């Protein structure tokens, strides 16, 4: 879990960079257009507020003077200004939400792309250095875009308000303007001083909330296993510990909020009386009209609010600072994970070839050698059994071939990703329709229903098709199918994709010998060169070469048929 201090300078730099990237993107022109409209609308709102202050002054003066005609005339003006202000404010809010949505979609797409590029998601999970990247991409990106835009607009609005109402206050009383500026400055400083711990506490709270939610999701996803293992008590204790941590951190937040609340509440109440204390003596002596008192109160409170953005929005600002810092941590972790993609084990792509060049694999974290300087070349059409007593070495070889981070050195030469597929011991089937699971993206028009149904019949999956409701019914396959059925569907996906090579991991532990023989036969018929990690059993005749992984890194490589010529043979 990432518990390091929040890097404020790096966070600020990333914040600025995020805005620049969005402004220069393919949707940047649209964003600039909407933002320009928002600025114009904010100017309109502040202009109407100034007009409203004068209309309100005249309205209250008419009441004090008992001038019926002026009262009705100012009332009409009042209603007109309110109507115009309402229309402009609603349109501004609508434009703000549309711009926030545009920005969120842009940032989220970029985040998802970076997260899934070069198996970054896998490296982040394996490293365990970043807590809950899924929450950061989904919730923190939303909070970042919406809140950033909100604060930028509030800042601009505050600037416009200061410009608009500073003149109004100055015309009433220069002393009142000086008091407003001094009051807001002192209030902002004291609020920051009292509430500074909230940034770190809010940062931690987001992670603790996510950890508790993840614990609940873990129970739901592993319900059957937990029941069978009778581990409910252990899960209860774990969830209670996560809840206790969440509550303890939130208690700390409420203590800081209490201290900040005492100050900000009193600060807000005083704003209402300060203008009257300064202006009332002039009204009492007859120097100003009664309406000036109400105008000064409105102008003072509006101007102080503009200067006091930190005071009035400190809770939101502290949450926002935590969100920005968490997204900065996500970007740093993604960059580090992608930088580590260049592992000591080099992977190069070469069409139609699979080879290992002086490949050494080690077990983490001890560094014990699993496979030492493996150098073999597997031409297309040569079906290989990867076997031997060293199962850890076979698993590491499977991962290294797939491009998953494995400790070691050497080089793996393999076809491009779309021309080599891997079938893990526990295959993954994405949620969706059966057609989406089986047919590669973009090739729906090439693979007809007849082809799919024929292969399902050969694998004795006809009853499954009836059970799930056809090819176009969506399901959560991980929950609705057995491991055996998932294996067969994953294999069917390989057949429909028709890569040059397929590497199958321990299929003999899930499927019986007849089924293994059947799928290997289908692979051969479709000109797919296969490697199988497992035991030979009754399918030894399905292979043309054997790579045996022995203890202490030793291996042997030999053909099992006299007509097969291997380009590289040896042992270690």
Image (cartoon, rainbow, N blue to C red):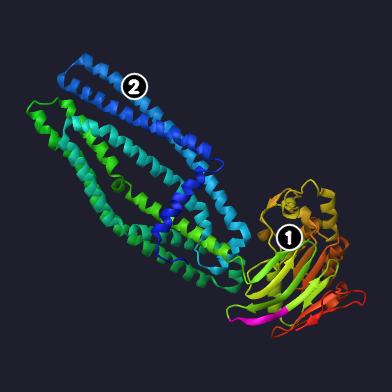
Compared across the picture, whether 285 is left or right of 248 comes to left
Q: Residue at x 61, y 57 (%)?
A: 116
**Circle 1 sits on which residue?**
416
Would residue 187 be counted in the magenta stretch?
no
Secondary structure of the magenta portion, mostly? Answer: strand
Query: Residue 80 shows which numbered tag?
Result: 2
**Can the viewer see residue 506 in this picture?**
no
Quarter of the figure with residue 571: bottom right
Q: Judge depth for marks 2 and 1 and give the one in front.
A: 1
Q: Residue at x 55, y 40 (%)?
A: 27
Query: Residue 500 shows which numbered tag?
Result: none
**Segment colored magenta:** 366-373
- Mark 2 nearby-residue class (10 Å; few <14, some 14–19, many ≥20): few
Compared across the picture, whether 561 is left or right of 135 comes to right
Residue pushed farthest top?
69
Badge 2 element: helix
Q: Is residue 540 above or below residue 525?
A: below
**Relative image position of residue 517 (x, y in whole percent):** 85, 69
- The first of marks 2 and 1 along the sequence is 2
- Mark 1 nearby-residue class (10 Å; few <14, some 14–19, many ≥20): some
Compared across the picture, whether 517 is left or right of 397 comes to right
Q: Is residue 334 above or below residue 355?
A: above
């Amino acid at each position: 879990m990432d518990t390091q201090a929040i890097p404020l300078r790096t966070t600020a730099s990333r914040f600025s960079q995020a805005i620049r990237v969005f402004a220069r993107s393919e949707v940047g022109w649209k964003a600039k257009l909407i933002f320009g409209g928002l600025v114009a609308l904010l100017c309109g709102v502040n202009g109407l507020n100034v007009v409203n202050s004068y209309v309100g002054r005249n309205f209250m003066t008419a009441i004090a003077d008992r001038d019926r005609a002026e009262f009705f005339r100012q009332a009409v003006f009042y209603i007109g200004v309110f109507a115009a202000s309402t229309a402009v404010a609603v349109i501004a809010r609508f434009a703000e939400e549309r711009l926030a949505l545009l920005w969120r979609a842009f940032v989220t797409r970029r985040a998802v792309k970076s997260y899934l590029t070069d198996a970054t998601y896998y490296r982040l999970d394996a490293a365990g250095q970043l807590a809950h990247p899924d929450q950061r991409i989904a919730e923190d990106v939303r909070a970042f875009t919406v809140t950033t835009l909100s604060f930028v607009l509030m800042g601009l609005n505050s600037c416009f308000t200061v410009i608009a109402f500073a003149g109004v206050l100055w015309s009433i009383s220069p002393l009142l303007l000086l008091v407003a500026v001094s009051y807001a400055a002192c209030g902002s400083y004291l609020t920051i001083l009292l509430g500074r711990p909230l940034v770190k506490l809010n940062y931690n709270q987001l992670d603790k909330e996510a950890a508790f939610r993840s614990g609940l999701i873990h129970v739901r996803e592993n319900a059957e296993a937990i029941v069978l293992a009778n581990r409910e008590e252990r899960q209860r204790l774990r969830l209670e510990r996560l809840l206790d941590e969440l509550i303890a951190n939130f208690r700390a937040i409420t203590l800081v909020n209490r201290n900040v609340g005492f100050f900000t509440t009193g600060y807000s109440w005083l704003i209402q009386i300060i203008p009257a204390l300064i202006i009332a003596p002039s009204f009492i002596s007859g120097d100003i009209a009664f309406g000036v008192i109400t105008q000064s109160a409105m102008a003072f409170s509006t101007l102080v609010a503009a200067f006091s953005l930190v005071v009035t929005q400190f809770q939101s600002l502290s949450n926002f600072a935590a969100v920005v810092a968490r997204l900065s941590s996500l970007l740093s972790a993604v960059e580090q994970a992608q930088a580590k993609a260049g592992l000591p084990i080099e992977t190069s792509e070469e069409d139609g070839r699979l080879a290992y060049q002086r490949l050494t694999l080690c077990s983490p974290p001890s560094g014990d050698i699993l496979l030492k300087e493996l150098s073999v070349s597997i031409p297309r059409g040569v079906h290989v059994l990867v076997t031997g007593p060293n199962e850890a070495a076979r698993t590491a070889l499977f991962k290294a071939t797939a491009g998953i981070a494995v400790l070691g050195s050497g080089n793996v030469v393999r076809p491009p990703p779309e021309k080599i597929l891997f079938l893990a011991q526990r295959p993954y089937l994405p949620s969706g329709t059966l057609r989406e699971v089986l047919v590669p993206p973009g090739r729906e028009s090439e693979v007809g229903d007849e082809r799919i149904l024929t292969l399902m019949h050969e694998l004795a999956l006809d009853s499954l098709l009836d059970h799930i409701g056809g090819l176009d019914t969506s399901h959560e396959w991980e929950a609705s199918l057995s491991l055996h059925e998932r294996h067969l569907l994953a294999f069917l996906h390989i057949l429909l994709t028709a890569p040059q090579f397929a590497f199958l991991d321990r299929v003999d532990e899930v499927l019986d010998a007849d089924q293994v023989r059947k799928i290997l036969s289908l692979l051969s018929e479709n000109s797919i060169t296969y490697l199988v990690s497992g035991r030979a059993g009754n399918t030894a005749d399905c292979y043309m070469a054997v790579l045996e992984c022995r203890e202490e890194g030793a291996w042997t490589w030999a053909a099992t048929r006299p007509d097969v010529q291997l380009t590289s043979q040896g042992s270690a």
